[in-house]
Amino acid sequence: MLGVGRRPVGLWHRAWREGGRDALLPMGPGGSSYLSAKQEAELEVLLWAGPMEHGWEDQRGRWRGSAG
């Protein structure tokens, strides 16, 4: 959906869970996000829906199991 692997999504999810939307903002030089505004909005919707909504086995802190 976003064209990235599980690891970056896991890192984004953890950052979002611990620091909210502001935690997803770029921290380094350049000041631009890795995601477009549309992708950021899509990611927020996906994260709010939770792992079980997307085929994961449980609602734990780490998204585990198989989505397929």
Image (cartoon, rainbow, N blue to C red):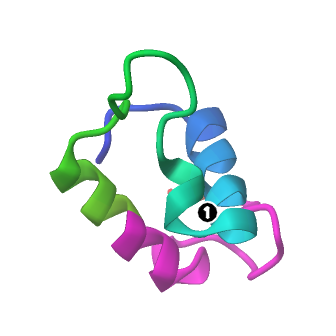
Say which of 8 and 68 sits in front: 8
Q: Position of residue 35 (x, y in %)?
A: 31, 38
Quarter occupied by residue 20:
bottom right
Per the image, label 1 sits on a secondary structure element best described as helix
Quarter occupied by residue 56:
bottom right
* Residue 37 colored in magenta in the image: no
Tell me: 13 left or right of 63. Answer: left
Q: Position of residue 49 (x, y in %)?
A: 46, 83
Picture layout, residue 51 above or below residue 28:
below
Residue pictured at 38% horizontal, 27% vertical: 31
Q: Which residue is label 1 attached to?
A: 16
Residue pictured at 32% horizontal, 33% vertical: 3
> How many neighbours does mark 1 have within 10 angstroms: few (below 14), some (14-19), or many (20 or more)?
some
Tell me: 31 left or right of 38. Answer: right
Kindly identify the amino acid type of the residue bearing the numbered disc 1.
Answer: Trp
Quarter occupied by residue 50:
bottom right
Toward the top, the furthest residue is: 29
Q: Position of residue 18 (x, y in %)?
A: 75, 66
Say which of 9 and 57 sits in front: 9
Q: How many callouts does the rendering have?
A: 1
Tell me: 52 left or right of 33. Answer: right
Toward the left, the furthest residue is: 38
Residue pictured at 56% horizontal, 45% vertical: 9
Q: Position of residue 27 (x, y in %)?
A: 57, 32
Tell me: 31 left or right of 48. Answer: left
| Residue extent of the magenta highlight | 44-65
Residue pictured at 71% horizontal, 75% vertical: 57
